[in-house]
Image: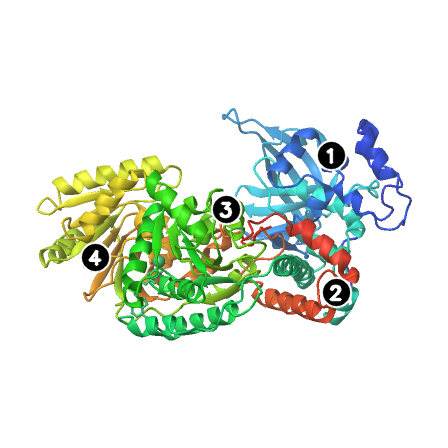
Amino acid sequence: MMASVAAAPPSAELSEPPRAFASGKQQDRELLAATPLRARPRPSRLAVRITALRGAGPRLAETASELGIDSIGDLLWHLPHTYRDRSALSEIGELRIGQEATVEVEVRSVKLRPTRRRRLTIVEATVADESGPAKAVWFNQPWLAEQLAGGTRVLLSGKLDRSGFKVSAHEVVGDEPDDGVPPAGLHTTGIVPVHPASARLRPQKLRDWAWQALAFARHAIEPLPSSLRQKLELAAVGDALAAAHFPSDLAEADVGRQRLAFEELFLHQAALASRRSKHDAARRAPALDPPGELTPAWIKSLPFGLTADQSRAVEEIDTDLAGERPMQRLLMGEVGSGKTVCALYAMLRAVESGHQAALMAPTETLAEQHFQTLERLLAGAGLPSATLLTGSTSAARRREALAHLANGQLELVVGTHALIERDVEFARLALAVVDEQHRFGVNQRAALDSKGPGDAAPHTLHMTATPIPRTLSMTAYGDLDVTALHELPAGRRPVKTWVVGEEKRSGAYEFIRERLREGRQAFVVCPLVSESDKLQARAATKEGERLAKGEFRDFEVDVLHGQMKADDKQRAMGRFASGETDVLVATSVIEVGIDVPNASAMVIEEADRYGLSQLHQLRGRVGRGEYESACILFADTEAEAATIRLETISSERDGFKLAEVDLSLRGEGEILGTRQHGLPRFRAATLPRDSGTLLRARDEVLALLHRHGSLDAPELGPLMDAARMRFGDERAEPIAA
Ligand code: ADP
Ligand code: MG
């Protein structure tokens, strides 16, 4: 598959120590020189700090550290993000203005040209090849005037413009280079790799280091079982690294990178699978009886029929609950997709078979809302005993609740972190629901997981209102079973969405006033100020005052932001829900929470600051009733890229699809919350580009698991060691450790 490897790295590695070793880095030098030539691979040598390399002093090493590069191994995995094709040398005579090229020339004369600007120096040289002379120009490298004597042969990469050939990289073509010193042409000829660099650590430096580091690539551990490598025709890791850094052509670079991406995704999937099977093996959960009378009757009593997605979720939950393997299911669906109904079903199933159930939400507001929903929807089921437990629960009520949870009198509890405090004990907790699961830490989820009876673990249903595409969820939630709710419940109307510029502002307010006069209500969402909740709160307050005196002076305006006290928030929401206020000026806190069917219009300021998924969630706060609803996005329409991105949201209503667009346009890091969702930082793999590779990696992990019965089989030792080393504790794990 990968026949040859390009530029040969220094082969007789360190038989002659590179120059830097002559100058005092004694320790590194001994460590490196200790290995005889052609010895067995020694992975520990990849841990050697980069200061062992020529041209890597302590200052630059510090800068490199900011890029995540400390060791030679880090450098090997710091892959080029692009390549420049300099495989053809040009002749001076054939260059056109504006053309980028590499030429090989002889320096005729060189001089430092005076300039008026103190910070600017220009070195000018007359250079020539067989086709003729040209003027070459360097900026801010005055020492070159001394270095480049007449007669020197140099390779120049750069661009021809009217004032001459502007050099971006040059290399002196000389005698055979010393050992450990890259050959001339590394930076200017062939396929030139460009590594992600920084202002103080330029690509040329990184390229030089990468070339030196490649001598150590053969010490990289090969984590992939050889049978798998044969089956999939994958090169050895060392060859793949060489191909990715210094390929002979672009196809080879791609093959190398894909091989590394496969390894990464494969190790990650293996780590997740092993974590899950450990959790499964460690503790049993109570196997629940099949549905009795309570739950079917309850479903019938609901004022609506379940959507097809909800029915499927309920079936999958039933299957999970019937077993002793602790359920670890993630219910993924945007706000309003009907997750809570599914969660209540699971909770009722626990109660029905004589157990207790708990629902934990990240905020008091959410907990209260869930509790209200529970009371409303369970009224028809002959409400089991239930209570709300949050930080604001009075001491007396808390004492009573704890007593009743411990003796089993209380069957259902909804709450916040208050639920996982040490003194909260359950008589027989069989089901735990974690809403907005990414907002809890590993320890908090583990604490809930430990509240099961005796050694048993509760079945756990995780919920998230952030839909992400399947390939992402396989990496972020690879150790959970995922159920997605795509379909919105009947009765939800599409929200008409427009992206507009400043010039439409007064028209937009008039549009909103019309709705208000018809008796509807509206949201105004203030700009996202990511640096500070305080600033954001202040902005919302100011905007509220402005609108109350200005555009909406004939209406009731109220403000809602995250810095308000819980009571005040509650009151503001209550007034809006009851129709007392017409316009709610809010920060993005309304994203979770509010359900007001009479609200039919929304304005979002500086919409280009938000991700598509986030805008979609915000927009989901309107269109919940019988009225035609509208969402107006204010954005800087001069910024074309942002406008194109935002236009997608006018036509697309599926949150999963919007997340996919976000993903392909902005990269995985930008999708709302994916960082918190525990996506690891991959070094070779990029999603969604490598979706196919991910699916293959997952299949192969499952095949291994199937063949060996467990990933703990001794012959998988090296693989699992590598998986743990790479992904062991990097991500927040949903499953208790
Ligand atoms: P989520 O928890 O995903 O935000 P909820 O379960 O709170 O969604 O449901 C949102 C609203 O839609 C609630 O008022 C709920 O009663 C209602 N609802 C849920 N499922 C359906 C359905 N199948 N048909 C109609 N309305 C539904
Ligand atoms: Mg909800």
The image quarter containing residue 640 is: bottom left
Disc with the residue nearer the chain's start (4 vs 2) = 2
Residue matched to label 3: 444
Residue at 85%, 37% (x, y): give it.
17
Residue matched to label 1: 51
In the drawing, does residue 470 fall left or right of residue 308?
Answer: right
Q: Residues within 10 Å of mark 4 (few under 14, many from 20)?
A: many
Q: Amino acid at mark 2?
A: Met
Label drawn at residue 2: 2
In the drawing, does residue 435 fall left or right of residue 699?
Answer: left
Q: Nearer the viewer, mark 2 or mark 3?
A: 3
The image quarter containing residue 547 is: top left
Q: Position of residue 633 (x, y in %)?
A: 28, 54
In this rendering, the answer to whether 402 lies above or below 375 is above
Q: Is the residue under label 3 in contact with that under label 2 (CB below 8 Å)?
A: no
Residue matched to label 4: 601
Label drawn at residue 478: none
Residue at 65%, 50% (x, y): give it.
728
Disc with the residue nearer the chain's start (2 vs 1) = 2
Q: Nearer the viewer, residue 99 or 429?
A: 429
Q: Position of residue 611 (x, y in %)?
A: 39, 53
Q: Residues within 10 Å of mark 2 (few under 14, many from 20)?
A: some
Alpha carbons under labels 2 and 3: distance apart: 47 Å
Q: Is residue 673 visible?
A: no
Alpha carbons under labels 4 and 3: distance apart: 38 Å
| Count of picture labels | 4
Q: Residues within 10 Å of mark 3 (few under 14, many from 20)?
A: some
Q: Position of residue 25 (x, y in %)?
A: 79, 29
Q: Amino acid at mark 4?
A: Ala
What is the secondary structure assignment of the residue under circle 2? loop
Disc with the residue nearer the chain's start (1 vs 4) = 1
In the drawing, does residue 44 fall left or right of residue 641?
Answer: right
